[in-house]
Image (spheres, rainbow, N blue to C red):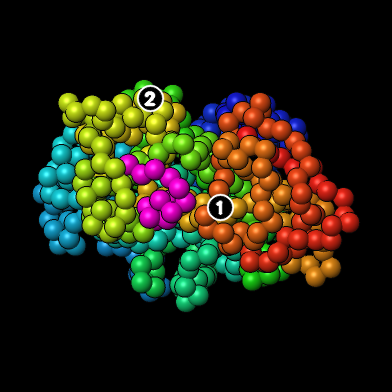
Amino acid sequence: VVNYNPETVSTDYDESDRLYFEELSFERVLDIYEAERSMGVVVSVGGQIPNILALPLSKQGVNILGTSPSSIDCAEDRNKFSALLDSIGVDQPRWCQAANIDAADAFAQEVTYPVLVRPSYVLSGAAMRVAADREQLREFLETAADVSDEHPVVVSKFIVNAKEIEFDAVAKDGTILNYAISEHVENAGVHSGDATLVLPAQKLYTETQRRVKRIAGNIAAALKITGPFNIQFISKSNDVKVIECNLRASRSFPFVSKTFQTNFIELATRAMVGLPVHPANIKLLDLDFCCVKSSLFSFNRLQGADPTLGVEMASTGEVACFGQDMHEAYLLSVMSAGLKLPPKDKGILFAVGPLDAKESLAPYAQTLSNMGFKLYGTEGTAKHFAEREVAVEALAKPSSSVHPNIKDMLSDGSIGLVINIPDALNRVDESDGYRIRRTAVDFGVSLITNEKGAIALISALDNIKEIPCLSIQDYYALGEASLSYNKPTQRLIRSNLVGSTTSSQTPRAARSADQFDFLQSNKQVQKANIESSLLRKRARTGSLSAPSTEQLPEMMQIQ
């Protein structure tokens, strides 16, 4: 293994016969290949750099295992890949290469704004922007990009309110062996490394999934893929288009392997070295659980950074959690990623810019109000919600001379959650929205900046009253007819209910019941036996009751 990441030395140093802590460069890899007298090189598990090295290494006589270097080059070169998609009848967002600002603007007007602007040779969305109008396009190209004949920019049509879909698979000689289709919670426009991933997909049309699989199969056959690969799709109203294809293992491969209890990398390795392969029999409808992967961010350590999600990758880690449905999995995932759920004695602030976002979030704000939360809002948001008969107290923006304003309320701890949806497609550093987001992060207040993420969180809070403490083996076994569990249920009880016990109602019963609170520290945890029976296999609306003669489980109270 050749890797210069220090974490490889600390965690996986014994996974290979030899670990070379060296840079991933053409000369160094060639030196190691010759010194080891290797029979071949695997380039599909090391990210973008090995894929770039595949073609020059092949020209020097290095045996590249798996997908051929020419196919890798075809997928990496935007012109070649676009021509390939056209030849096999696969749709893609319209795009062009522009060598100057006027050419970029002419194309953007032809396809209509907004457009996505990507400088040449970028990684993780670096220096990418979404331009909503001509002014934003010109500003970006004049200040942030070196545009010339030698360094053209790629301008592509940005599809608003579309869903992004991930297709991870292993193929051999162009035939797909196993695959996974997962969906992003956020709409397209959030980098795949920052997006919240749901597997199995919960809100995709069956026909959309068929089209995704069919297109992926055609691409795999055209490129004669052997090994792991990832394709990113964008879909709106069942119209599926390809964004890009990476002939390597993506960051979601371990996530997919854990969810499906199938080692995708082992299958890919056997395919690449020519050993017999046996695809796993994965039936999505037989999975009685859901898995959600959330990203971790370090905005609190980056002074002045705008904590929003966009086409540039900003996350520094990720965490995945299982649940019996998406609500459970999503709630556990965002809590594990550091989101603190607001207690009832703190308010929730809505600062929503786009009109369509105000409209879609209004009923969910009413849901929070029905749950007993005090709602605050900026003047525009509060006015719109009031027109929808949602009780929201208006607060002055941070730039206002009126006190107390939003900044005052955030700094004194009166607000426990901020839902701020930026108005423009690009971040404006000195806007009131930026001040709200930055103040929330600086004072440790939970922040959500995506409309779909806010809806998913509120829906989970509204549906979930308790979460069973199950091991990963228990989740894998869900659905077996003879299975009964003896695992306790984790109940999160709000501080204003200390000393009381929760009812045994089902999760959808008693909407007014108190919801989850976030575990702030170990000192707040007390273990006690609560009048509850052992958990048995159940549907979401089923009962958790069991014979009272069974031994009471040890329960966790959050006070």
Observer-nearest of 78 and 213: 213
Q: Is residue 372 above or below residue 23?
A: below
Q: Position of residue 498 (x, y in %)?
A: 63, 37
Observer-nearest of 333 and 39: 333
What amino acid type should be assigned to the residue bearing mark 2?
Asp
Q: Position of residue 532 (x, y in %)?
A: 76, 52
Badge 2 marks a residue whose secondary structure is loop
The residue that mark 2 highlights is 412
Q: Is residue 548 above or below residue 435?
A: below
Observer-nearest of 395 and 13: 395
The residue that mark 1 highlights is 513
Image label count: 2
What amino acid type should be assigned to the residue bearing mark 1?
Ala
> How dense is the environment of label 2, judged by Cα within 10 Å: few (below 14), some, or many (20 and up)?
few
Observer-nearest of 227 and 116: 116
In the image, the segment drawn in magenta is 364-376
Determine whether, in the image, residue 144 is placed left or right of residue 173. Answer: left
Residue at 43%, 45% (x, y): give it. 373
